[in-house]
């Protein structure tokens, strides 16, 4: 564990329980986001992508959900 992470954990430990939970949720969301971005980059590097025109056709269905 890095020194900065140790300091961050010490600071978080000083917060009230609900704030610790909120911060933990935020961190977990950020980690999930970064993992999804890495997965997308890896897929793009493999050439596993869709043409732009196909994606444009999909957008209205995303907005409807």
Image (tube, rainbow, N blue to C red):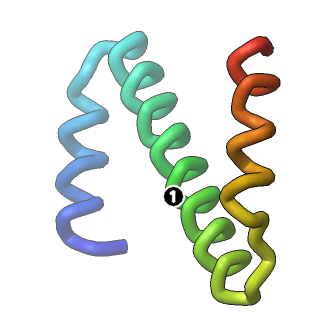
Question: Which corner quadrant of the image does residue 42 belong to?
Answer: bottom right
Under tag 1, what secondary structure? helix
Front-most of 63 and 32? 63
Q: Quadrant of the N terminus?
A: bottom left
Front-most of 26 and 2? 26
Q: Quadrant of the C terminus?
A: top right
Question: Which x, y percent locates residue 2?
Answer: 28, 74
Front-most of 53 and 6? 53
Q: Is residue 32 left or right of residue 1?
A: right
Residue sitting at 38 percent across and 29 percent down?
Answer: 23
Question: Which x, y percent locates residue 39?
Answer: 67, 68
Vertical placement of residue 55 versus 14, above or below: below
Question: Which x, y percent locates residue 45?
Answer: 65, 87
Vertical placement of residue 51 versus 29, above or below: below
Q: Residue furthest front?
A: 53
Question: Which corner quadrant of the image does residue 46 belong to?
Answer: bottom right
Front-most of 20 and 27? 27
Question: Which x, y percent locates residue 48?
Answer: 80, 77
Residue sitting at 54 percent across and 49 percent down?
Answer: 33
Q: Is residue 35 left or right of residue 21?
A: right
Q: Which residue is mark 1?
A: 34
Callout count = 1
Residue sitting at 25 percent across and 22 percent down?
Answer: 15
Q: Residue furthest bottom?
A: 46
């Amino acid at each position: 564990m890095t020194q900065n992470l140790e300091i961050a954990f010490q600071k978080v430990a000083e917060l009230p329980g609900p704030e610790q939970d909120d911060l933990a949720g935020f961190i977990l969301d950020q980690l999930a986001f970064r993992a999804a971005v890495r997965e997308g980059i890896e897929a793009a590097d493999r050439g596993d992508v869709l043409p732009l025109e196909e994606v444009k056709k999909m957008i209205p269905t995303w907005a409807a959900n």
